[in-house]
Image (spheres, grey):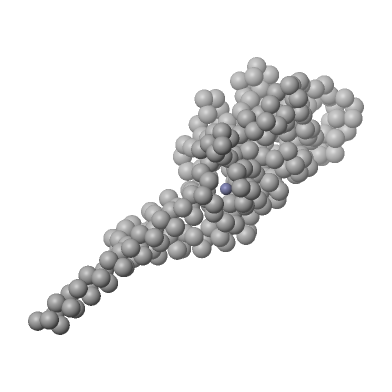
Amino acid sequence: MKTQFSLSDELMEKINSFARRELSKDEVYAFPVILCDNEIDRDNERFSVEALKTLSELFVGKTGIFDHNPKGENQTARIFDTEIMADNDRKTQSGEPYTALIGKAYMIRTSKNADLIAEIDGGIKKEVSISCSVAKKLCSVCGKDKTQQSCSHVRGRKYAGKLCHVILCEPLDAYEFSFVAIPAQRGAGVTKSMGDSGREFIFSDEEQKIRDALIAKALKHGFLLQPVLPLTELKSLLTLCDTEKLREICDGLTRAEKYRRAATYSHEENLGNKIYKL
Ligand SMILES: [Zn+2]
């Protein structure tokens, strides 16, 4: 897949639609980035090809940051164009032709970012992470939308020889992309739902409501089960889980609480009978 491109007049025009003043070819540095693709990632998730098409529109005009120097004014890039590229000779794990969303980004050349440009040119900086929100997360086995309901299929397991994964559909918005240093420092620090795949999901309002309800329910049952549980810490742990995992934890705690209650009642009943007999 050839992602390199040369700066045509047409592309310069697109760049200049974002610039405050007319820029010349010599002033800008333009480069491609693979934003995302339809291959199943380390989180056992992938984008649908339709989702990549929607993202290709959403990403135009979005900025990219470089993690090692987020404060530098010139250390940002902007996507001025996008392109969907498919490689028919390369099949993904789910059997589709490999398809990627390529972002064409530009930066203004300055003496301050000369090193950075050299790093990009040299291929040292090539991993990017993106943030976006999607409306639907479909189970690859049964097609249920995991943001709305649970199913018995576990991602990462095989069913009839096929790897169960989650298909990310209907992107609602794309926020930004960032270069991550190699070796990737992902998951370090306080980055919230940043998975190994380097995608940070911002939840849709609807999914956030479902998540809030699940967290509240899990905390309530957790407390009834074990009143000495450190609830604040538990809550911050729960917010790190994806919605699917959150639902599993919530169901588990609800079930455990139900058993506890049943056991307590039968114990009290037995006690009552004994007292009665006395
Ligand atoms: Zn399923």
x 73%, y 38%: residue:
49
Residue 21 quadrant: top right
x 58%, y 40%: residue:
165
Across and down, in percent, residue 92 comes to 66, 29
x 51%, y 38%: residue:
157
Q: Residue furthest top?
A: 122
Q: On the rendered image, what quadrant is the N terminus found in?
A: top right
x 65%, y 50%: residue:
136
Residue 24 quadrant: top right
Residue 270 quadrant: bottom left
Q: Residue furthest left?
A: 278
Asked whether 10 or 223 is in front, the reply is 223
Q: On the rendered image, what quadrant is the C terminus found in?
A: bottom left
60 versus 98 height, above or below: below
- Is residue 158 visible in the rendered image? The answer is yes
Asked whether 131 or 144 is in front, the reply is 144
Across and down, in percent, residue 53 comes to 77, 40
Across and down, in percent, residue 229 comes to 32, 58
Asked whether 99 or 16 is in front, the reply is 99
Marks counted in the figure total 0
Q: Residue furthest right?
A: 9
- Is residue 75 visible in the rendered image? The answer is no
Across and down, in percent, residue 29 comes to 75, 25
Q: Horizontally, is 166 left or right of 33 in the view?
A: left
6 versus 255 height, above or below: above
